[in-house]
Amino acid sequence: MQNLKKIFYSALACTFLFNLNAPVNSTEKEVKVYSGRHYNTDRSVFKKFAEETGIKVRLIEAAGISLIERLKREGENSQADLILLVDAARITNAAKLGLLQKINSITLENDVPVGLKDPNKEWYALTRRVRVMVANPKVVDVSKINDYTDLADPSLKGQVCLRNRKSPYNQSLVANQIINKGEEATKNWLNGMISNVSQPFFPGDISIVRAVSKRKCGVGIVNHYYVARMLAGVNGRRDALYAKKNNSPYT
Ligand SMILES: [Fe+2]
Protein backbone atom coordinates (compact mmCIF):
# COMPACT_ATOMS: atom_id res chain seq x y z
CA MET A 1 0.00 0.00 0.00
CA GLN A 2 1.89 2.96 -1.29
CA ASN A 3 0.37 5.69 0.77
CA LEU A 4 0.22 3.82 4.05
CA LYS A 5 3.81 4.25 4.89
CA LYS A 6 6.64 5.84 6.69
CA ILE A 7 4.74 8.09 8.98
CA PHE A 8 6.67 7.46 12.08
CA TYR A 9 10.33 7.01 12.60
CA SER A 10 11.80 6.32 15.90
CA ALA A 11 15.27 5.40 16.82
CA LEU A 12 15.94 1.88 17.93
CA ALA A 13 19.02 3.22 19.40
CA CYS A 14 22.29 1.77 20.33
CA THR A 15 23.89 3.25 23.37
CA PHE A 16 27.43 2.88 24.42
CA LEU A 17 28.54 2.62 27.94
CA PHE A 18 32.17 2.13 28.61
CA ASN A 19 33.06 0.95 32.00
CA LEU A 20 36.52 2.01 32.93
CA ASN A 21 36.55 -0.17 36.02
CA ALA A 22 36.04 -3.42 34.14
CA PRO A 23 38.93 -5.78 34.76
CA VAL A 24 41.20 -6.30 31.79
CA ASN A 25 42.04 -9.89 31.05
CA SER A 26 45.10 -10.04 28.88
CA THR A 27 44.63 -13.66 27.82
CA GLU A 28 41.05 -13.41 26.62
CA LYS A 29 39.56 -10.21 25.33
CA GLU A 30 35.86 -9.92 25.88
CA VAL A 31 33.14 -7.34 25.49
CA LYS A 32 30.03 -7.58 27.62
CA VAL A 33 26.85 -6.51 25.87
CA TYR A 34 23.53 -5.90 27.61
CA SER A 35 20.79 -6.09 25.01
CA GLY A 36 17.11 -5.27 25.13
CA ARG A 37 16.76 -6.28 21.49
CA HIS A 38 15.64 -9.72 20.43
CA TYR A 39 16.78 -10.18 16.89
CA ASN A 40 18.89 -12.84 15.21
CA THR A 41 20.46 -10.17 13.02
CA ASP A 42 22.20 -8.77 16.11
CA ARG A 43 23.54 -12.19 17.06
CA SER A 44 25.02 -12.70 13.61
CA VAL A 45 26.72 -9.29 13.83
CA PHE A 46 28.25 -10.25 17.21
CA LYS A 47 29.45 -13.54 15.74
CA LYS A 48 31.07 -11.79 12.80
CA PHE A 49 32.69 -9.24 15.14
CA ALA A 50 34.15 -12.05 17.26
CA GLU A 51 35.49 -13.84 14.19
CA GLU A 52 37.07 -10.70 12.78
CA THR A 53 38.59 -9.33 15.97
CA GLY A 54 39.10 -12.34 18.22
CA ILE A 55 37.17 -10.46 20.91
CA LYS A 56 34.50 -12.60 22.52
CA VAL A 57 31.02 -11.08 22.88
CA ARG A 58 29.28 -11.95 26.14
CA LEU A 59 25.60 -11.25 25.51
CA ILE A 60 23.15 -10.64 28.32
CA GLU A 61 19.62 -10.35 26.97
CA ALA A 62 16.66 -9.04 28.97
CA ALA A 63 13.85 -6.50 28.73
CA GLY A 64 15.19 -2.94 28.34
CA ILE A 65 13.71 -1.76 31.63
CA SER A 66 15.33 -4.63 33.57
CA LEU A 67 18.69 -3.85 32.01
CA ILE A 68 18.44 -0.22 33.05
CA GLU A 69 17.52 -1.32 36.58
CA ARG A 70 20.47 -3.69 36.54
CA LEU A 71 22.84 -0.92 35.49
CA LYS A 72 21.51 1.25 38.32
CA ARG A 73 21.99 -1.58 40.80
CA GLU A 74 25.48 -2.43 39.61
CA GLY A 75 26.54 1.20 39.59
CA GLU A 76 30.29 1.73 39.41
CA ASN A 77 30.90 -2.02 39.55
CA SER A 78 28.98 -2.79 36.38
CA GLN A 79 30.85 -4.99 33.93
CA ALA A 80 28.73 -3.81 31.00
CA ASP A 81 30.65 -2.39 28.07
CA LEU A 82 27.74 -1.73 25.77
CA ILE A 83 23.99 -1.52 26.10
CA LEU A 84 21.52 -1.86 23.26
CA LEU A 85 18.04 -0.53 23.94
CA VAL A 86 14.86 -0.32 21.96
CA ASP A 87 13.22 3.08 21.72
CA ALA A 88 14.71 6.54 21.81
CA ALA A 89 12.85 7.48 25.00
CA ARG A 90 14.52 4.64 26.92
CA ILE A 91 17.92 5.69 25.69
CA THR A 92 17.55 9.33 26.61
CA ASN A 93 16.16 8.35 30.01
CA ALA A 94 19.19 6.15 30.65
CA ALA A 95 21.44 9.05 29.66
CA LYS A 96 19.56 11.43 31.95
CA LEU A 97 20.03 8.98 34.83
CA GLY A 98 23.77 9.23 34.29
CA LEU A 99 24.14 5.54 33.39
CA LEU A 100 26.06 6.11 30.18
CA GLN A 101 29.51 7.35 29.38
CA LYS A 102 30.84 9.38 26.54
CA ILE A 103 32.60 7.64 23.68
CA ASN A 104 34.92 9.34 21.25
CA SER A 105 34.69 7.47 17.96
CA ILE A 106 35.39 9.03 14.59
CA THR A 107 33.63 6.11 12.89
CA LEU A 108 30.42 6.58 14.85
CA GLU A 109 30.55 10.33 14.39
CA ASN A 110 30.93 9.92 10.62
CA ASP A 111 28.50 7.06 10.12
CA VAL A 112 25.56 8.18 12.24
CA PRO A 113 23.66 11.20 10.90
CA VAL A 114 22.85 14.26 12.97
CA GLY A 115 19.52 13.83 14.74
CA LEU A 116 20.22 10.16 15.40
CA LYS A 117 23.00 10.67 17.91
CA ASP A 118 23.50 12.32 21.23
CA PRO A 119 25.29 15.71 21.11
CA ASN A 120 27.05 14.57 24.32
CA LYS A 121 28.26 11.41 22.53
CA GLU A 122 26.71 9.07 25.08
CA TRP A 123 24.55 7.20 22.56
CA TYR A 124 24.27 6.54 18.85
CA ALA A 125 21.26 5.18 16.98
CA LEU A 126 21.73 1.90 15.20
CA THR A 127 18.43 1.35 13.42
CA ARG A 128 15.07 3.01 12.92
CA ARG A 129 11.62 1.57 12.82
CA VAL A 130 8.50 2.58 10.98
CA ARG A 131 5.18 2.14 12.74
CA VAL A 132 3.07 1.12 9.74
CA MET A 133 -0.59 0.40 9.24
CA VAL A 134 -1.63 -2.99 7.95
CA ALA A 135 -5.12 -3.35 6.52
CA ASN A 136 -7.27 -6.11 5.09
CA PRO A 137 -8.72 -4.89 1.77
CA LYS A 138 -11.57 -7.40 2.15
CA VAL A 139 -12.69 -5.68 5.35
CA VAL A 140 -11.93 -1.98 4.89
CA ASP A 141 -11.60 0.45 2.01
CA VAL A 142 -7.83 0.89 1.97
CA SER A 143 -8.00 3.91 -0.32
CA LYS A 144 -9.54 5.82 2.60
CA ILE A 145 -6.73 5.01 5.03
CA ASN A 146 -3.83 7.27 4.27
CA ASP A 147 -2.73 8.55 7.62
CA TYR A 148 -2.98 7.61 11.29
CA THR A 149 -5.71 10.24 11.65
CA ASP A 150 -7.94 8.18 9.33
CA LEU A 151 -8.09 5.48 12.00
CA ALA A 152 -10.29 7.84 14.01
CA ASP A 153 -12.91 7.95 11.24
CA PRO A 154 -16.30 6.64 12.44
CA SER A 155 -16.56 4.48 9.28
CA LEU A 156 -13.94 2.21 10.89
CA LYS A 157 -16.11 1.46 13.93
CA GLY A 158 -15.13 -1.92 15.37
CA GLN A 159 -12.40 -2.41 12.75
CA VAL A 160 -9.32 -0.97 14.43
CA CYS A 161 -6.96 -3.21 16.40
CA LEU A 162 -4.26 -1.77 18.61
CA ARG A 163 -1.51 -2.97 20.83
CA ASN A 164 -1.62 -2.47 24.57
CA ARG A 165 -1.01 1.13 25.61
CA LYS A 166 1.89 0.07 27.83
CA SER A 167 3.93 -0.75 24.73
CA PRO A 168 6.76 1.76 24.27
CA TYR A 169 6.06 1.49 20.53
CA ASN A 170 2.63 3.03 21.09
CA GLN A 171 3.82 5.55 23.65
CA SER A 172 6.48 6.85 21.28
CA LEU A 173 3.99 7.03 18.44
CA VAL A 174 1.72 9.18 20.60
CA ALA A 175 4.68 11.36 21.62
CA ASN A 176 5.56 11.72 17.93
CA GLN A 177 2.02 12.85 17.10
CA ILE A 178 2.02 15.36 19.97
CA ILE A 179 5.20 16.89 18.55
CA ASN A 180 3.91 16.88 14.96
CA LYS A 181 0.26 17.78 15.45
CA GLY A 182 -0.08 19.21 18.94
CA GLU A 183 -1.77 17.95 22.08
CA GLU A 184 -5.35 18.80 21.17
CA ALA A 185 -5.28 17.15 17.74
CA THR A 186 -3.55 14.08 19.20
CA LYS A 187 -6.15 13.80 21.95
CA ASN A 188 -8.98 13.94 19.41
CA TRP A 189 -7.24 11.38 17.21
CA LEU A 190 -6.73 9.01 20.14
CA ASN A 191 -10.32 9.35 21.35
CA GLY A 192 -11.69 8.72 17.86
CA MET A 193 -9.35 5.81 17.16
CA ILE A 194 -9.95 4.14 20.52
CA SER A 195 -13.73 4.39 20.02
CA ASN A 196 -13.22 2.34 16.84
CA VAL A 197 -11.58 -0.47 18.82
CA SER A 198 -13.98 -3.28 19.66
CA GLN A 199 -11.72 -5.98 21.00
CA PRO A 200 -9.12 -6.27 23.76
CA PHE A 201 -5.81 -4.56 23.14
CA PHE A 202 -3.23 -6.93 21.66
CA PRO A 203 -0.13 -8.09 23.52
CA GLY A 204 2.12 -7.98 20.43
CA ASP A 205 2.44 -6.72 16.88
CA ILE A 206 2.51 -10.16 15.24
CA SER A 207 -0.87 -11.09 16.69
CA ILE A 208 -2.30 -7.89 15.17
CA VAL A 209 -1.03 -8.83 11.69
CA ARG A 210 -2.59 -12.29 12.10
CA ALA A 211 -5.92 -10.86 13.32
CA VAL A 212 -6.09 -8.42 10.38
CA SER A 213 -5.51 -11.18 7.87
CA LYS A 214 -8.12 -13.39 9.56
CA ARG A 215 -10.61 -10.51 9.19
CA LYS A 216 -10.96 -10.17 12.96
CA CYS A 217 -9.80 -6.58 12.42
CA GLY A 218 -9.80 -4.30 9.41
CA VAL A 219 -6.67 -2.34 10.21
CA GLY A 220 -3.93 -2.24 12.83
CA ILE A 221 -0.65 -0.48 13.60
CA VAL A 222 2.56 -2.50 13.84
CA ASN A 223 6.30 -2.12 13.43
CA HIS A 224 7.42 -2.61 9.84
CA TYR A 225 9.98 -5.31 10.59
CA TYR A 226 7.38 -7.71 12.00
CA VAL A 227 5.55 -7.58 8.66
CA ALA A 228 8.82 -7.97 6.75
CA ARG A 229 9.87 -10.94 8.87
CA MET A 230 6.51 -12.65 8.45
CA LEU A 231 6.54 -12.07 4.69
CA ALA A 232 10.06 -13.48 4.50
CA GLY A 233 8.87 -16.67 6.17
CA VAL A 234 11.05 -16.22 9.26
CA ASN A 235 8.07 -17.06 11.50
CA GLY A 236 6.97 -20.00 9.36
CA ARG A 237 4.80 -20.58 6.31
CA ARG A 238 1.49 -19.85 7.97
CA ASP A 239 2.56 -16.38 9.13
CA ALA A 240 3.94 -15.65 5.66
CA LEU A 241 0.51 -16.42 4.21
CA TYR A 242 -1.21 -14.25 6.81
CA ALA A 243 1.09 -11.31 6.08
CA LYS A 244 0.52 -11.64 2.33
CA LYS A 245 -3.23 -11.30 2.73
CA ASN A 246 -2.89 -7.80 4.16
CA ASN A 247 -2.06 -4.52 2.56
CA SER A 248 1.10 -3.12 4.02
CA PRO A 249 4.02 -1.09 2.68
CA TYR A 250 5.49 -4.34 1.39
CA THR A 251 2.56 -5.78 -0.52
FE1 LIG B 1 10.29 -5.47 18.41
Image: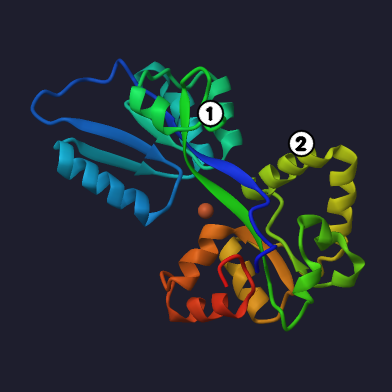
Q: Is residue 246 above or below residue 95?
A: below
Q: Which residue is mark 2?
A: 179
For disc 1, the neighbor class at 10 Å (few under 14, some 14 to 19, many from 20) is few
Amino acid type of disc 1? Answer: Val
Mark 1 or mark 2: whose residue is earlier in sequence: 1
Q: Is residue 46 above or below residue 205?
A: above
Residue sitting at x 36%, y 56% = 40
Residue 104: image x %, image y %?
Answer: 37, 18
Say what secondary structure mark 2 lies in. Answer: helix
The extreme left residue here reads 27
Residue sitting at x 67%, y 43% = 172
Say what secondary structure mark 1 lies in. Answer: loop
Image disc number at residue 114: 1
The one nearer the camera, 87 or 249, is: 249
Q: Quadrant of the C terminus?
A: bottom right
Residue 208: image x %, image y %?
Answer: 64, 68
Residue 126 position by quadrant: top left
Image side of residue 91 versus residue 76, left or right: right
Of badges 1 and 2, the one in the foreground is 1
Image disc number at residue 80: none
Amino acid type of disc 2? Answer: Ile
Residue 190: image x %, image y %?
Answer: 84, 52
Residue 54: image x %, image y %?
Answer: 14, 37
For disc 2, the neighbor class at 10 Å (few under 14, some 14 to 19, many from 20) is few
In space, the residues marked 1 and 2 are separated at their CA atoms by 19 Å
**Residue 167 appears in the picture as rendered:** no
The one nearer the camera, 206 or 182, is: 182
Image side of residue 148 versus residue 1, left or right: right
Does the residue tagged 2 have its C-beta within 8 Å of any atom of ligand 1?
Answer: no
